[in-house]
Image (cartoon, grey):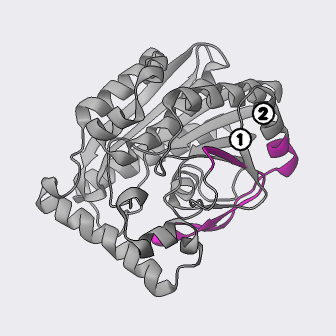
Amino acid sequence: MSAHLECLSHTPLLGHFDPPRLVLDEVFAVMEAGNRRIAAFDPELVVLFSPDHFNGFFYNVMPSFCLGTGAHAIGDFDSAKGRLSVPFDLATDCATAVMDQGIDIAVSHDMRVDHGFAYPLEHLLGGLDKNPVIPIFINSVAAPLPTFRRARLLGEAVGFWARSTSKRVLFLASGGLSHQPPVPVYANSPEPVRRNLDGAGYDLSPEERAARTNRVIDASKAFVKDPTTLHPLNPAWDNGFLDRLEAQTYGQFDTVANETVSKIAGNSTHEAKTWVAAFAALSSYGPYTTSDRYYREIPEWIAGYGALSAKPLGA
C-alpha cells in the first residue's frame, strides 16, 4: 500500500498562444520531471480530480461531484481525444464507498471530459489509456459551487477507500490557480448562450467549436496587451494557497466563501479545489512531505500556473 500525488495546472491554450520559449521550456521541464516521478512510482491505479468548462457538464444536470465508471475525452482545443482506461468495478466500488461515508457523488457510466482531464493524462502519464484511472469531476465554474470544505471531505473519503485497495495509488489534480478566462456566467448571459449552458452545448457544430476556441485565444492575446481586460492574476493568493498545501493547513480554506475567492483571484480559481481534494486524499495515508513546487504567472495562458508533488512521510 503506497500513494503519490502530483498537482498540475492545465491550459487549453498550449500550442495556440504560448509564452516565450524560455517559459515554455520551463513548463515542459516541470511536466517531464513529474512524468519521471510517476514512472518511478509505477502506479497501479490513478485517481484524477479535475473540473469541466461547460463541455461535459451543463445546467440541465450539474452535480457538485461526479465519478466516471467509464469516460471519454472530447478533444477540445486539440487536446487528447478518446476513451480513458477506467476500471468499472473499482470505480463503482469507490463511488459506493464515498457515498457510504456521507458524500453524495453522482456517477456516470460514460463521463464526457474535456482538456481539464486530458491535459494531465497526456502530459504526466503519456496518454489517456496508459494507466487505469478513476476520473472525478468537481464543479468549479457553474454556480452554485461546492465549497472548499466539501471538496476536502470528498478527497478524504476517496483517500480512505484508496487505502483499502492495497494498491499503489497516484492522486492527480489539475486546475487553477488564479484565473478568469472568458467562461460565460449564466446570470448575465444572453438567451442563446443560456441555451448552450443548459445543454445545447453538447452538440456544438465544428464552426461553433472553432468560434469558441478562437474567443479564448483572442481573449488571451488581449489580456497580454492589456491586463485590465480580464480579472488580474493573483500570485500572492496562489503562493499562499501552495504554502497551505505544503504546511498541511489547507483546512483553513473551509471557512473561505466562494464569493471571496472569485473576487480575490477570479471566477475559475475554484478549480484549485481539485488540489485540495487530492491532498485530502493523500492525507488519509498520514502526514506527507511535498517537493518540486513550481509557480509562474503566465498571462498568455490566462493563468497562475503551478505544480506540486507530495508523498506520505517516510515513503
Q: Quadrant of residue 239?
A: top left
Q: Which mark is residue 99?
A: 2
Residue at figure coordinates x 54%, y 49% from the top left: 124
The reply to whether callout 2 and callout 1 are in contact (CB within 8 Å) is yes
Residue at figure coordinates x 43%, y 76% from the top left: 192
Q: How many residues crowd mark 1 within 10 Å: few (<14), some (14–19), many (20+)?
A: some
Q: How many residues crowd mark 2 within 10 Å: few (<14), some (14–19), many (20+)?
A: some
Region of the chain picked out in magenta, as a range: 63-92
Q: Secondary structure at mark 2?
A: helix
Confirm whether the magenta stretch covers residue 67. yes
Residue at figure coordinates x 53%, y 55% from the top left: 52
Instruction: Report the amino acid beneath label 2.
Output: Met
Which is nearer the eye, 17 or 2?
A: 17
Q: Quadrant of residue 249?
A: top left
Image quarter (top left, top right, bottom left or bottom right) of the C terminus: top right
- Asked whether residue 167 is in view, the answer is no
Confirm whether the magenta stretch covers residue 45. no
Q: Secondary structure at mark 1?
A: loop
Instruction: Report the amino acid beneath label 1.
Output: Ile
N-term mark: 2 or 1:
2
Say whether residue 57 is left or right of residue 255: right
Which is nearer the eye, 164 or 64?
A: 64
Q: Which mark is residue 105?
A: 1
On the image, the x and y values in percent for residue 68 come to 72, 52
